[in-house]
Amino acid sequence: MSTQPYAAPADAGGSPLLLVGVGRAGCAAAARIWRSSGGRIRTLLADTDARTGIENPGVPFLLMGANRLGGAGAGGSVANARAAAHESMHDFAERAGTPRLAVVTAGLGGGTGGGASMEILERLRRSGAVTLAFATMPFAFEGPAAAKAAMNARPLIERNADASVFPPMDGLVGCADSACMDEAFARGADAAAAGITLFWRLLETPGYISLDLERVRNLAADAGPAVFISATASGPDRAEKILAALSDSPAYGADGRPPKASKLVLGVMGGRDLRLAEVGGIAKGAAGIFGDPQEFAMGTVDDEDAFSGRISVAAFAFAAPTRERRDSRRRGRAAPDPLSPMHGHFGGAEGNLWNGEDIDVPTYIRRKLTLER
Amino acid sequence: MSTSSPVAALEIGTGRITLAVAERQPSGRLKITGVKSLESSGVRKSRITGLNNVKKTIQAVVRDLQDAASVDISNAWLAVSGPGVETKPLKGAWRTDMRKITDDDVAAVEENATENNGLDGSSRMVLHNLSQDFVLDGRTGIANPVGMTGQQLERRALCVHYALAQFDDAREAAAASHVEIPNAAFSGCCAARAVLGERERQDGVLVIDLGAGSTSYIAFTCGYVAAAGSIAAGGDHVTADLATAFGITRKQAEGLKIAEGCAVLRSESAGRRISIPSTTPGFQARSVSARAVETVVNARMDEIFRMVQDRLEASGPTTSLLAAGCVLTGGGAAMPRVCELAASTLGLPARIGEPVNVDGLENDPFPAALAVPAGLALLAADAEEAAAGERGGFMSMFKRIFS
């Protein structure tokens, strides 16, 4: 089933945090984070393509759907990827254990990132983990087919994750016009990995103001869509630069404006020169930028080696969950599962997705048509 | 009197398993000399999920047809559809000195296109490399560049490929009846081969085969295949929707669909009730609203056409290039007023596709439902005759199955 045995580092085995990379892009980002942490972050890569395991030696790897796909990848098919994830779900559950908080990284626009992530998120959530999906949207140059595949997968990921972030690759890279293709992808993955690494450091190595894992867990639980922004600045006006970056980030999409958040998690990382006034100014400014959220959690990391002379900030701004989402979760209604044996007449066949909808569910139900009785 | 040995065509569908035999007539036209079709079980979304059930049905179909048509069926071509079918654009390039292009140049550029298809041969099999056009020094739309002068020759084609495991399952099912499956063809190609003429392909046309488990489509522009594919939704979904909507069995829902289904909402259905007889002793018959039945059917059929439209738009051809409109085949085409719905959803004139390129189905109540086996028989006969001739067979590099 897997190309290499899962062997988490001894010091990470009992970690309540788990990082899961799904699909080629998601695994690349997760592997970068794992390497930058020196292997301390408990990480599991899951892909349908066996090459991912070979390309990331040392990182625990699960080959999904080995019987079905033979390690050749999902061929861009979301249905193949979902079926592969189902096939390997028992193995995944064994290796994932029961983390308190799980971050799932994926790249949307292909097959495995979009298709398997939703299954993995659902499984993690069922095991009691609060799940945070970090799924990058494809570059514009990847074309309308990739964009459409990503838009199809997005609502299903949103439905299965407690909180979900969908940063556009174009936004992560910035101005990619001059970058060649592989460089653009690498820069996007680097940016995503750097942001998540900052967040991780905040939880794993807190400074004077610590950010408690359970606090983050409570804030992220059932939070819904979120935006994630990270920024780094140096110089005497670095705090102002950070706030300017938070105000005007490509992560805000076409709207270009920061969303009004109901919850905000803010991490401020600096060296020994990090001043209280700077931390206070950033905290106050960030709260204002995101519309004074009802709940606000903050932490700092003091690391002279990594942040000497500069400040880095990582922020998760969670939008208020919709009433429909709250009601759905309260009733414990699981997302329709096209691969489940209980999924009506089509239980024995692979699931179908179109525009983010499971088309094995009757059309009149999905279109909310009222039938004359 | 036939002029060649009979060919057999097998379609393992979600709703029915159909076997047809055909023979070439002295006129040169192919005639379907026997067809047997039985209700299928063990197939979901055009994929075999219950091998033993499929084996039994194929055995019954083969036995009945051999008895009825007095032929020995030892091999049959297979029509495939569903999500196992995928397509991939191919592009080959070949550079020469500035001179007239020869047959060897064409062979070289076609070899270049096919050898770089990037498919994993252990899991995928090539069904068709469908010819598109040649590009010579930037000039596109060239059907045959031989004799033209240029340097840089490109070949564009569409590779239709299929899941090898699913093909093996079908072979295994047929082997129980001592029937060998030498080859397979995409159901969309089969339907188009049976129902289209050269003029329509030149004008631009879309063929949609409405099967029970899947819907296959193929679009032609300027005479060549511009897009093709298969969607895992079809008449079986309509039946399942009706069963869910009214809390009835699938058998009742299938009967309701056939008797009362309509692709559009009819004004005369307002207020009308439909009686559904009980199939279980002790339970009373019940009635449902005719408008509700049509609402369920219309929603699903409309969605299927929209999915095809989405796929087409993603592949390139727009409805403005399909001047000859849309041709509907398959059992789903028997749904009343389905052409009306297709026309309004796709924005194209729509008609039912009779298999005009074969004889022998004139007395069938709805020949369009047999377009796939009829077209498959045509493809099989063409290929076997070509293989018996001096060059090329069905598995030659580029199959000009529509010329």
Image (cartoon, coloured by chain):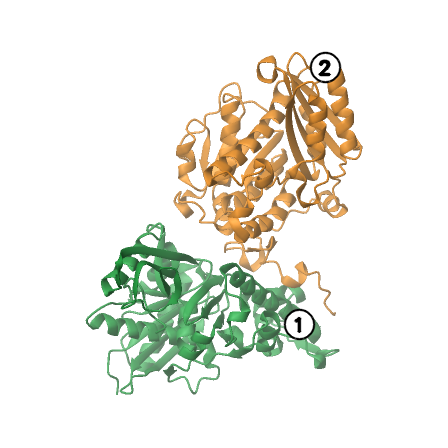
Chain colours: A orange, B green
Quarter that holds the N terminus of chain A: top left
Give me the chain letter of mark 2. A
Where residue B128 appears, as percent x and y from the top left, is 35, 63
> From this viewpoint, is residue B336 visible?
yes
> Is residue B24 rendered to the left or right of residue B218?
left
Give me the chain letter of mark 1. B
Q: Nearer the viewer, mark 2 or mark 1?
A: 2
> Is residue B306 rendered to the left or right of residue B152?
right
Residue at x 69% of width, y 26% of height? A241
Residue at x 33% of width, y 61% of height? B171
> Is residue A263 rendered to the left or right of residue B165?
right
Q: Amino acid at mark 2?
A: Arg
Residue behind mark 2? A275
Residue behind mark 1? B293
Quarter that holds the C terminus of chain A: bottom right
Q: Amino acid at mark 1?
A: Val
- The answer to which image quadrant residue B110 occupies is bottom left
Residues under numbered marks 2 and 1 in contact, where contact means CB atoms less than 8 Å apart: no
